[in-house]
Image (cartoon, helix red, strand yellow):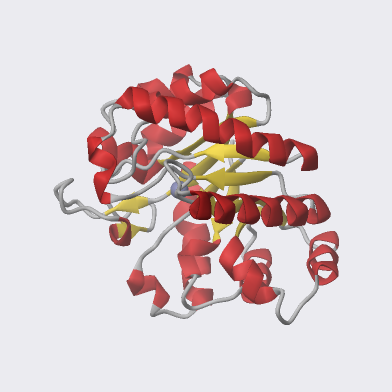
Amino acid sequence: MLKLGFNEATCKENSSVERDLELCEKYGYDYIELRLDMLKEYLKTHTVEDLKAFFAKSHLKPFAFNSIENINFCSPEEWKEVVDLVTFGCQLSKEIGNKYLIIVPTVRDDMIFKNEQEIFEDSVKVINELADIAEQYGVGLSFEPIGDRRWCCNSVRQAWEIVQAVNRDSVGLTVDCINVYMHDKCADVDYIRKIPKEKLFVYHINDCEDLPLRVLDHCHRIMPGKGCIPIAEVSKAVMDVGYDGPACLELFRPEYWEMDAEDVIKMGAECCAPYLK
Ligand code: ZN
């Protein structure tokens, strides 16, 4: 049995932290994945105490912050930005009881020329450096492979090898339906079962339009059940591992950003429900 989670990317252009909190509580979500850019905006007019007060009186709880991107092959300036964002995310996580930061491999045109050994070595090094920071705050890092080849780590298999080599209790994996699909149309869905329960930190649920992989992009994500991803199979693999946390609805669909956030969040709860049990 999975819980219901909401990832703020889903309404990032038509909502705010304040409104997402209110609507997710109204429609029965158990957890929310807050976005760091939206939190920075929220904190211009609110305080950390406001956030704490909301969670203290709500069923809805924080789960993971999204996301620390482009962690690989950084220039010194880029690395400083990554470290600053991780530190900000960790400080806030500690204050409000947020468990995880999601960390994402680098997307850049030249990533297709990196071989797997180079990516492995760089990832192990940078994730260890970030975990040195996050552990001071008691925050876990959840590494998310992105199925598209423009990102340097594309598969659950590749990400799991990296996480195993890092070998720290505070570092685990995010499994995301569309990223499993984008890699090889879910041919390796069984591989998810090799991840031990304590290493599967986060599950992102979504569907996508039936497009060729060379065309398919994150803007084609769609509500669960409305596309071509075998979500029931992916969810089953995640549950077979023993994962019983939230399936967090994560979409980047411009069509939904044109809608009223309330309609999207209500539809999200309905569309996710069949895949939680
Ligand atoms: Zn995701």
Please state the horizontal and vertical placement of residue 4, each as a whole percent of the image. Answer: 59, 50
* 16 or 272, nearer to the observer: 16
Please state the horizontal and vertical placement of residue 83, each as a whole percent of the image. Answer: 62, 50
Please state the horizontal and vertical placement of residue 32, each as a whole percent of the image. Answer: 63, 56
* 84 or 32, nearer to the observer: 84
* 71 or 204, nearer to the observer: 71
| Residue appearing at x 37%, y 42% in the figure | 146
| Residue appearing at x 56%, y 19% in the figure | 196
Rendered position, 164 above or below 142: above
| Residue appearing at x 52%, y 25% in the figure | 163
User: For the view shown, which residue lies furthest in the front direction?
Assistant: 76
Rendered position, 127 above or below 92: above
Q: In the displayed structure, does residue 206 sit left or right of residue 86? A: left
| Residue appearing at x 80%, y 73% in the figure | 47
| Quadrant of the rendering where the N terminus is positioned | top right
Rendered position, 63 above or below 140: below
Please state the horizontal and vertical placement of residue 249, each as a whole percent of the image. Answer: 49, 54
Q: Quadrant of residue 46?
A: bottom right
Is residue 137 in sight in this rendering? Answer: yes
Is residue 185 in sight in this rendering? Answer: no
